[in-house]
Image: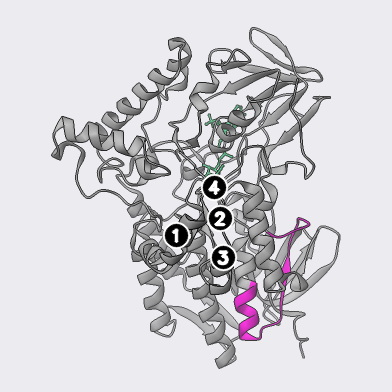
Amino acid sequence: MTAAPNFDAIVIGSGMSGMYQLYRLRELGLTTRVLEAGTGVGGTWYWNRYPGARFDSESYSYQFSFSKEMLDEWDWSEHFAGQPETLRYLDRVADKYDLRKDIQFRSRVKSAHWREADRQWVVGLEDGTSYSCRFLITAVGPLSAPTMPNIPGVDSFAGESCHTARWPHEPVSFVGKRVAVIGTGATGVQTIQEVAKTAKSLTVFQRTPNWCAPLLNSKIAPAEMAEIRANYPAMFQRCLETFSCFLHTPDLRKTFEVTDQEREAFWEKLYASPGFGIWLGNFSDMMTDRAANAAISDFVANKIRQRVKNQAVAEKLIPKNHGFGTRRVPMETKYFEVYNQDNVKLVDINETPIERITPTGLTTSDIEYEFDSIVFATGFDAITGSFDRIDIRGTDGQRLKDRWSHGPETYLGTMVDGFPNMLMLMGPHMALGNIPRSIEHNVDWVTDLMRHARDRKIVRIEPTPQEVKAWTDHVKELGMGNLLFEVNSWMTGVNTNVEGKQVRIVNRYSGSAPAYRARCDAVAASGYQELALAQ
Ligand code: N01
């Protein structure tokens, strides 16, 4: 005799994927509880309140498409909306669909253990409470486990300090302050641009420069918003057809197929166009042909040289150990011009390493700096990190963290053998791309599977080891030849601040989003024959 679970489904996280999954599970009539560590919805957009945080993708292409009412009523004020506007949008979605009544806030999940006897997950919270559920759906986000740098004395600073993904809800002023920013990824770049406007002094500690490109954001006037809205069906259709669901998609030509003049003109146009075009809409061989990649890298390097007055500083800002686009390209708004300001200093910590953080600032190999504030823009234990932080145990007590110690193994990025009834949203081996578009497909697929299970009284779902191996091998093969997988970054699972994460792995699906969806849809159409389903 076994007891019924507390819930049909528990969803961990109330970011965009958790919110939409809740909405869909309610439609199925499944009792669902969302457990959320924060005090509000929005995930990434709830936590990352750092100065300058904003979309790098066109706002309208990054919203939910499932709700016609929201599409009709929500006006975006900028082509690339700032974090406050995006969070207001997500709050509005939560209000409209009364999502909060099934979300338990301030509830950080510490453990999730599978109990084979009654085919339930037991989910434990930090405060000691626990709940049982039939299905466990992780909506924990690929970039949600922030990491502090492994610098001696990191906790000793007595002034204001914060990781960008743990930014306070109250406004933080840098007016008249001596500020340090450590980290120059997409987050650091956005933060630096903003802090430089008001700080008395800003010292940027850079370990690896990144290839940044102009965002070219602008306001959306009401008439333009009406045009954008009228085009929504075509726009969402385009997103379904492009390689990574973005509005931008590679140009079919190859770099050296065109004349030198045509190539220059094309790159000039991309550099002067808003958004990710220069990264995602470039020649089709940019990420696979070394000579092609070197050519676009030279083009962008020259732009940096033109924009930064001091050529010694410009050279420090030009990446030397990886080519353009092989790491996520941070989108910038006058980022390089910041280094022309008298109040800004760039420190290359390869030349003068940070030795320790002190109560009053930090010490490099040559200088003792004093600061009022230190901003840690030091990134995330990406993709698997948010899973590792939960003690997830499957059949026979197997720990997911151990199972993935040499890299993730998944079935379609959504399931793992040995972890029955665990469904992952935006997990490893997923087509990330334009994340909201991927989320909507991922959630709809999981929802269809839940419907299938509900209608047939299926209480146990597990992929076979053969299918997990086949998908994992497929994902690894797709990565071969892509220059991105030859470079250390969160996209290849490397984080120097996390033990055991110094070796590159394939943690993301790098095929096309349409191919990924077609594979998933075929599985559903077959009645999930590849899965072991039990009543
Ligand atoms: O993190 P990162 P991020 N000592 O890992 C440095 C998304 N995003 O938060 O490169 C010194 O890219 C580290 O140096 P290095 C986007 O997908 C989206 O910036 O490892 N430095 C690097 O410079 C993005 O790619 C948007 O040598 C240390 C930085 O910290 C992803 O989030 C906006 C260090 C970390 O950069 C992650 O971006 C922002 C140490 N010990 C972000 N440890 C939008 O679209 C780390 N660093 C709106």
Q: Secondary structure at mark 4?
A: loop
Residue positioned 36% across, 63% down in the render? 238
- For label 1, the SS is helix
Pair 1/4: label in front: 1
Q: Which residues are magenta?
A: 22-41
Question: Residue 213, located in which quarter of the rendered image?
Answer: top left
Q: Which residue is denoted by mark 3 in the rendering? A: 424
* Kind of residue indicated by mark 4: Phe
Residue 94: x, y in percent?
Answer: 69, 67
| Separation of marks 3 and 1 at Cα, in angstroms | 33 Å
Q: Quadrant of residue 49?
A: top right
Disc 4 residue crowd, few under 14, some 14–19, many 20+, Cα 10 Å: many
| Callout 1–callout 2 Cβ contact below 8 Å | yes
Q: Which residue is mark 4?
A: 55
Quadrant that contains the C terminus: bottom right
Q: Which residue lies most toward the top here?
A: 366
Q: Nearer the viewer, residue 225 or 309?
A: 225
